[in-house]
Image (cartoon, rainbow, N blue to C red):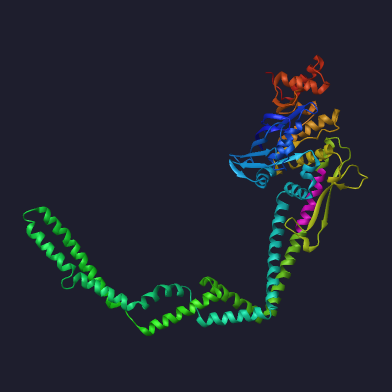
Amino acid sequence: MIDEIYVLDLALIHEATFSPAAGLTVLTGETGAGKTALLSALKLLVGERADASLVREGAEFAVVEGRVFRDSHDVEGVCASRRVGADGRSRVRLDGHLGSVRELTQAIGPTIDLCGQHEHQRLLDAATHVEMVDAWAGAPVAAALEGYREALKRARAAKDELDRVTAAARTQGSRLEEARFALERIDEVDPQEGEFEELEETLPRAEHAEALAGTAHEAAEAISGEGGALDALNSAIAELARMGSVDAKLAQFADTLTGAAITLEDASSDLRRYRDNVDFDPAELAQLQERFSAFKGLLRQFGPRMEDVFARREDARELLAVVSDGEARIKRAQEAVDVAEAALAKAAKMLTKRRNEAAPRFCREAGKQMARLKMGHAELVWESRPLPRERWNENGPTTCELLYRSGAGLTPRPLRRIASGGELSRVMLACKVVLGETDGVDTLVFDEVDAGVGGAVARSLAAVLADLARTHQVIVVTHLAQVAVIGERHYVVRKDDADVPETQLAEVSGEARVHEIARMLSGDESEASLIHARQMLQESGTWHES
């Protein structure tokens, strides 16, 4: 749902703010006043292509900013900004961060339907027809679709496995020889998990055993040997203790050094134990070096990491196993494919059945709404055509489309073949009323919905729009007073006569709204038209004197 839109220097608009109601908002104004400029702003906000011609004459850039709530659970909303320079370059910001047009389209595009011009009509995409029917049908189709998608996933996985084992079983020549050589070479060394890391730690100690033992011995002697550090330290302690009777501070030094002497004695003992535990075994050293060299050889061939060596061994084992047991594996994989395909066919049949049960009911309900809109005997017809198995996808095993027939004796045609934008918008309006709260799109913008409409049809159109506004945010550009009076919020678009014309967007209420409705009724603001306008507003229940 759109919370607010701010527009700067776009087309004829210098600056404007638009805050539609949660229900029905109407936009009115003289032809050529610039209502399409606001629609252009909306198109930019949902990610439509930017055009330098949209920038107002004399301005460096145009800006559209908006805050949109993506669903009823969204309490923060998305703050989006689209800036278009006079050079045609576009810049997007989402919640204060730089973004792309694609991100803008993904974030806001699905929440808004522009129902007016053919190139922007979501209804022209047959894929949306299935989405509408599925949403309206609810749980029965949803469960069937989920079951179908799971079955399709399993069938694809089974086919991938069959392709894999078939290709592996047919592997010949160099690949097979490479696998056999790799397995023999790695098994010859037979590396174990963690063994190489342990060798890296122990081998340097084995190689320098004599030096390590000698260093430990010399250090121990320097500490506790005759004339060593400990002897000197003990002499210092004795002297300090003797003079401590004269100055207590020297006694403290003696205590401190006594602790140090104990530490040195412990260190000397630890060094001697280390020396005694160093085991120099030339045969063991040679064995460790040989083992380490074998590991390095594996790493050069199959590394650079031991994980790569282990993975290469497993790949080689698998390939050789598949080749040796190829026919049996292919048979088992084919049986799995047959089982998965049978389950998929069953799920596909159920999905098609559920859709073909729901779709005609949806068409009948849409037909009732089109009848309210005085569209004669126009109706929607559901067409479901089976696809070849190789073309089945996540949406189903058939290609489905809502066709339009303006009369009972006429051939149904694709909706994109409807020439009138207004007629197409009214079909969309009928579908959206039927969908109600099951519709995934919150905001609907109608531009040409009242094209060629008047009299009783106008009143019917207003009633249908009012129904739609109970479940959607609806924005309508209209020339019909019958529609304008039912709006919860009413904006008027005006254009001045300056050298560089400027479009103004203003919300009207009270008497100002009465005058606008009067203009729409008769083209003037005579006393009779004002009385009629006031009466219409009072009957609609949307007008309050101000």
* Res 499 → quadrant: top right
Quarter of the image with the N terminus in it: top right
Residue 38 in view:
yes
* Res 182 → quadrant: bottom right
Q: Position of residue 8 (x, y in %)?
A: 67, 32
Q: Is residue 220 left or right of residue 8?
A: left
Q: Position of residue 291 (x, y in %)?
A: 45, 80
Task: Please tell me which residue is depicted at 74% across the width and 58% down the height of the picture.
Answer: 393
Q: Is residue 298 left or right of residue 329?
A: left
Q: Nearer the viewer, residue 223 or 264?
A: 223
Q: Is residue 535 above or below residue 164?
A: above
Count the marks.
Answer: 0
- Span colored in magenta: 350-364
Q: Nearer the viewer, residue 352 or 383?
A: 383
Q: Residue furthest bottom?
A: 283
* Res 467 → quadrant: top right
